[in-house]
Image (spheres, rainbow, N blue to C red):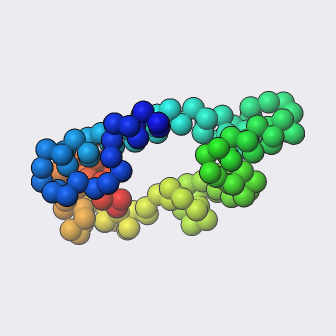
Amino acid sequence: VYLTSQCLSTDLPEELLSLDALKWVSGWSFYAFWMGAILTGPWVLAHECGHGAFSDSQTFNDIIGFILHQALLVPYFAWQYTHSKHHRRTNHLTDGESHVPSTAKEAGLGPNNEREGLYAAVHEVLGDGPFALFQVFTHL
C-alpha cells in the first residue's frame, strides 16, 4: 500500500482523455486486481471459520474468524448468521435469498421451452456463451 501511494496519485487526472488518465486508471486497476487476489486468501480462511470448517474447535473458529473478519472490515457474527441463513435455502425458487434461478416464464421460455420476448431474442442472436458474458456485465 505504501509503495502504491508513492507511485500513484489519489487525485483524479485533470484531463480524462489523456496519457496521465490512462496511466492513472491502469495503475489503480492493477492495484485493485492484486489487492483483491491477495485478500482472497484471508477471506477464504474467514469464510471457513464462519462455517466451522477451519478447526474442530468452534471457539477457535470464532476467534480466528472474528480476527480475520475485523481485518477485512466485515462483522463476523452478523455475517455468520446471515450466511448460514443463505445456505439453508440456496437456489430455492421462492425462498432463496440470492442466486435464485429464473423460472421458465421469467427466462422468456414458452410452453415447449422455445425462446420468446426481447430478452430471449437477444439470447438467440448472441448464443449461449456471449449471452452469459452479456449477463455478467449487465446483471440480468
Where residue 69 appears, as percent x and y from the top left, is 67, 46
Give the residue at x 36% y 50%. Answer: 10
Q: Which one is nearer the viewer's eye here, 78 or 119?
A: 78
Q: Which one is nearer the viewer's eye here, 75 or 111?
A: 75
Give the residue at x 18% y 46%. Answer: 20
Where residue 53 appears, as percent x and y from the top left, is 74, 34
Q: Which quadrant of the rendered structure holds the C terminus? A: bottom left
Residue 128 seen from this side: no
Q: Which one is nearer the viewer's eye here, 75 or 128?
A: 75
Residue 57 seen from this side: yes
Residue 64 horizontal side relative to residue 130, left or right: right
Where residue 14 appears, as percent x and y from the top left, is 19, 58
Up/down of 128 relative to 106, above or below: above
Quadrant of the image occupied by residue 117: bottom left
Q: Please count the marks in the image.
A: 0
Q: Which one is nearer the viewer's eye here, 25 or 99?
A: 25
Up/down of 24 relative to 17, above or below: above
Give the residue at x 21% y 68%. Answer: 118
Taking the view exactly as shown, the residue that stands out farthest to the front is 6
Quadrant of the image occupied by residue 94: bottom right
Residue 41 horizontal side relative to residue 25, left or right: right
Where residue 70 appears, as percent x and y from the top left, is 68, 47
